[in-house]
Image (cartoon, helix red, strand yellow):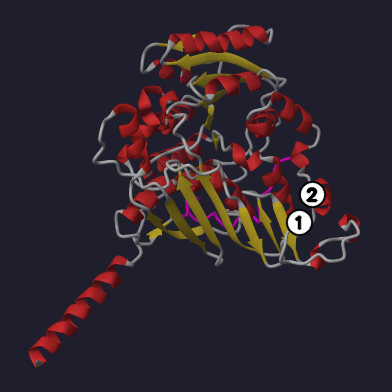
């Protein structure tokens, strides 16, 4: 009996020891910055009154970017590159329709993009390829003396992330991730409200990419996106949720993310879809239908991010901010809930019954959104909505990129934003593969996270 008792105690101790060990923080390596290399926080470069742009990748997103750029003064589109010849020719027809000169075409060769980054008459390389080529092209473009804008996610591995950071720091070239959702009109207005203190101290933010991709899988060249989900676990597409959340929390501008923990469901939806469409049974599909990640910051704030491209849910990026004096929510219903003291007299529209437990009435919301409209959309909002691109936010993104380059101003997003928002792909996979253990998130600024006192957009 005594022997059995001691065996039981030993077993319990072993189990508890295993649980404790599994919950230990997994450290993430931070390479030492090279001697003489410095950060690129608020980096400004020589003004470029005319911005000569080369586009690499003309599949699902590239042509839209080409079309939007034709509406921005001071942009000259000089090169178009894709694996497929017909795509470059179709993009040139966009220029022709806009009354602009044809651009030089590069196609056919898997390394044709290298000829583009080496061109002497290019200032900005705009990358909209499959994910696996994003960082590789971005690094080479900067080495070839070009600024670079990379579609989301900007990088898929920690090695790629650090390559982009180090190359930007060494070459002093801008490396911006093309995260359009930070320019959504609701998210911009809400950010301005947060910066003006309307919600008090922001304690928690939520974001997501919830989008059933069944109708779209076939549109990705050589099935690259479906294959990536098949080969990897984790939140592999986190930037749409991360961008607005991190901006509201001033990440690397007064706060930093310390660690994350990720959980996922079992795999069901996408293999079932593949079997229905092709008859093929996939046994080794890795990415769970739904992934949820929690992040804690240095200053005690939290972020929750979700990813689901497998199930029949309405599109959602969630986007929620919880503050000590108020709350903002975009999906499924846009609204604000505020402490009545937070609502100034000039936006009260004869509603005496406001409280912090329900959304403010529609007329109050409208007045708040007008009062707190973000300054960077002044003068371009109507044009953005007319040109389009996810309701206009894509145009605002491109316009701001070109505006800052033309005026020699720091860009709205830097290479550290790219790193912080993209790192969930590799780090959530590490957490999931280690029984949802906490994983350290590096300080990608390597000591500079508290130099800037809040997010600032150049004027």
Q: Is residue 4 above or below residue 208?
A: below
The crowding category of the residue bearing disc 1, from other C-alpha atoms within 10 Å (few below 14, some 14 to 19, many at least 20), is few
Q: CA distance from mark 1 to mark 2?
A: 9 Å
Residue 139, visible in the rendered structure: no
Q: Quadrant of the C terminus?
A: top right
Task: State which quadrant residue 279 falls in.
Answer: top left
Residue 367, how many percent across, how many down?
84, 50
The answer to whether residue 283 is magenta is no
Judge left or right: residue 319 versus residue 339.
Answer: left
Residue 196's label in the rendered image is 1
Q: Is residue 404 above or below residue 234?
A: above
Sooner in the amino-acid sequence: mark 1 or mark 2: 1
Can you give x and y, in whole percent of width and height, for residue 12 in the image? Answer: 21, 79
Residue count near mark 2 (Cα–Cα under 10 Å), binned few <14, some 14–19, many ≥20: some
Q: Nearer the viewer, mark 1 or mark 2?
A: 2
Secondary structure mostly taken by the magenta-highlighted segment of the chain: loop
**Residue depicted at 62% across the width and 55% down the height:** 320
Q: Regarding mark 2 in the picture, which secondary structure is present there? A: loop
Q: Which range of residues does the magenta coloring cover? A: 442-459
Q: Which residue is mark 2?
A: 372
Contact between labelled residues 2 and 1, with CB atoms less than 8 Å apart:
yes
Q: Residue at x 13, y 87 (%)?
A: 6
Give residue 246's position: percent from left, percent from top.
58, 52
Is residue 456 located in the magenta-colored stretch of the structure? Answer: yes
């Amino acid at each position: 009996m005594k022997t059995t008792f001691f065996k039981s105690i030993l077993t319990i101790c072993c189990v508890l020891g295993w649980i404790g060990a599994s919950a230990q923080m997994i450290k993430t390596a931070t390479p030492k910055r090279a001697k003489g290399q410095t950060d690129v926080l608020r980096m400004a470069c020589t003004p470029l009154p005319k911005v000569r742009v080369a586009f690499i990748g003309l599949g699902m997103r590239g042509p839209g970017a080409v079309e939007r750029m034709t509406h921005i003064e001071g942009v000259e589109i000089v090169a178009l590159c894709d694996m497929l010849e017909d795509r470059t020719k179709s993009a040139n027809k966009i220029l022709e329709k806009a009354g602009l000169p044809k651009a030089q075409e590069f196609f056919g060769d898997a390394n044709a993009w290298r000829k583009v980054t080496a061109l002497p008459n290019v200032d900005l390389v705009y990358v909209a390829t499959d994910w696996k080529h994003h960082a590789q092209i971005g690094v080479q473009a900067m080495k070839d003396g070009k600024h670079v804008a990379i579609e989301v996610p900007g990088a898929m591995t920690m090695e790629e992330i650090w390559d982009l950071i180090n190359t930007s720091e060494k070459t002093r070239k801008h490396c911006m991730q093309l995260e359009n959702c930070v320019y959504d009109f609701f998210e911009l207005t809400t950010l301005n409200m947060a910066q003006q203190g309307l919600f008090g101290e922001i304690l928690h933010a939520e974001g997501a990419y919830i989008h059933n991709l069944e109708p779209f899988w076939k549109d990705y060249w050589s099935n690259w996106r479906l294959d990536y989900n098949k080969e990897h676990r984790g939140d592999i597409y986190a930037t749409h949720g991360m961008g607005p959340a991190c901006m509201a929390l001033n990440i690397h501008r007064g706060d930093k993310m310390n660690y994350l923990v990720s959980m996922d469901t079992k795999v069901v939806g996408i293999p079932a879809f593949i079997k229905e469409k092709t008859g093929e049974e996939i046994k080794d599909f890795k990415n769970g239908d739904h992934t949820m990640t929690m992040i804690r910051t240095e200053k005690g704030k939290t972020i929750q991010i979700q990813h689901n491209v497998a199930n029949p849910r309405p599109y959602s990026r969630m986007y929620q901010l919880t503050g000590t004096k108020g709350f903002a929510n975009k999906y499924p219903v846009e609204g604000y809930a505020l402490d009545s003291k937070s609502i100034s007299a000039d936006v009260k529209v004869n509603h005496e019954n406001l409280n912090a437990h329900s959304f403010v009435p529609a007329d109050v919301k409208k007045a708040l959104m007008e009062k707190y409209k973000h300054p960077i959309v002044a003068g371009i909002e109507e044009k953005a909505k007319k040109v389009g691109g996810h309701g206009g936010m894509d145009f605002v993104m491109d316009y701001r990129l070109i505006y800052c380059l033309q005026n020699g101003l720091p860009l709205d997003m830097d290479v550290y934003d790219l790193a912080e928002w993209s790192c969930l792909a590799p780090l959530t996979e590490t957490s999931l593969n280690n029984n949802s253990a906490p994983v350290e998130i590096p300080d990608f600024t390597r000591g500079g996270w508290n130099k800037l006192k809040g997010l600032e957009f150049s004027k």
